[in-house]
Amino acid sequence: MNGIAAATLSSTLSNVLSEMCFADPERVPPGPIENALCVGIRFTGASGGNLRLAISAGTAKQLAADFLGLEAVDATEEVAQSFSLELANILCGSILASTGERLHLALPSAESIRQDEVHPFCWTVSGAGPEIALGLTFESSRG
Amino acid sequence: MTRKDNVFKTLVVDDSPLMRQFVARTLSIIDGSVHVLHAANGREAMDVTQSIRPDLIITDLNMPESNGDDLLDSLAASKSLCQIPVIVLTAEGERCRGGKPFRHEGVIACLQKPVRPEELREHIAPLLRRRADDHHAARLSQ
């Protein structure tokens, strides 16, 4: 298996969150994410693999509120969950678009996550430690 | 023709309630008179379309049970509904670049998510203007 480089993940995450929520994520050292929601998406086509997104529930609520033009208090857990699923979908599509390959995304699905899991690639949007973790791996060796 | 006849009905089709809410809000900012209908998949969208006949359909592609391509196929097969313009919103950028052609000629745009409000405005504004012109012409002829 090989994965997408951190630089590609970083630039895509930055572009997408800037576009959707006017947020500016910053790379932070690896670590666990508190109260994380986790989403996985499989993709198939010329290459197959999966994307995994973990986001703290509080961050998902805030970003969802910014995306919808709501006050943060009005963003429910359901809205946060819906946001995390759609964010994973959009990130996966954007990252894979850069490969130029014709790939099909499966529907995003919530996944279980160990709360003490240390994620290698992490970002913060509030400056308060790891809030978003992202990874994309291909099932077969490429290039 | 009544004022009610001038309402521009837009059907938003996406399995994500968050995305439907985002598009509805964006449409209300573009034009406060747009009436937004919702559907969570292609089958629901066809049910709504057959009963209400929207002026525009904005649809995701990747949905459970009945996806966007199923919806486009159903619209293309209907003589009465094939003229309804459709905007596709999808995370799969390759579709927007012609990777797999749409089987429905009514698709006027394919936009990759995340979509900017001005991108939607660019494609919706001409439809709103045409609707307003048609309504004005109809009133003059009465």
Image: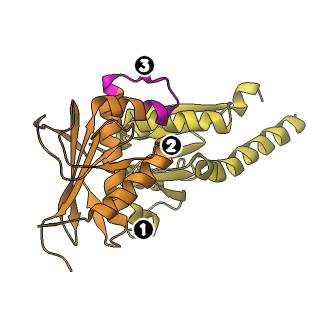
Chain colours: A orange, B yellow
Residue A2's x, y, as percent?
15, 68
Residue interval drawn in magenta: A65-78
Which residue matches tag 1?
B101
How dense is the environment of label 2, judged by Cα within 10 Å: few (below 14), some, or many (20 and up)?
some
Q: Quadrant of the N terminus of chain A?
A: bottom left
Per the image, label 2 sits on a secondary structure element best described as loop
Residue nearest the viewer, comparing B49 with A93: A93
Instruction: Report which residue position mark 2 lands on.
Output: A22
Task: Name the residue type under label 3.
Answer: Val
Secondary structure at numbered mark 1: loop
* Tag nearer the camera, 1 or 3: 3
Q: Position of residue A100 (x, y in %)?
A: 35, 73
Residue occupied by mark 3: A73
Instruction: Say which residue appears at 48% left-offset and 48% top-offset.
Output: A18
The percent coordinates of residue B109 (x first, y second) are 54, 58
Marks 3/2: CA distance? 18 Å
Amino acid type, mark 1: Pro
Q: Are marks 3 and 2 in contact (CB under 8 Å)?
A: no
Q: Amino acid at mark 2?
A: Phe
Q: Chain of mark 3?
A: A
Q: Nearer the viewer, residue B31 or B140?
A: B31
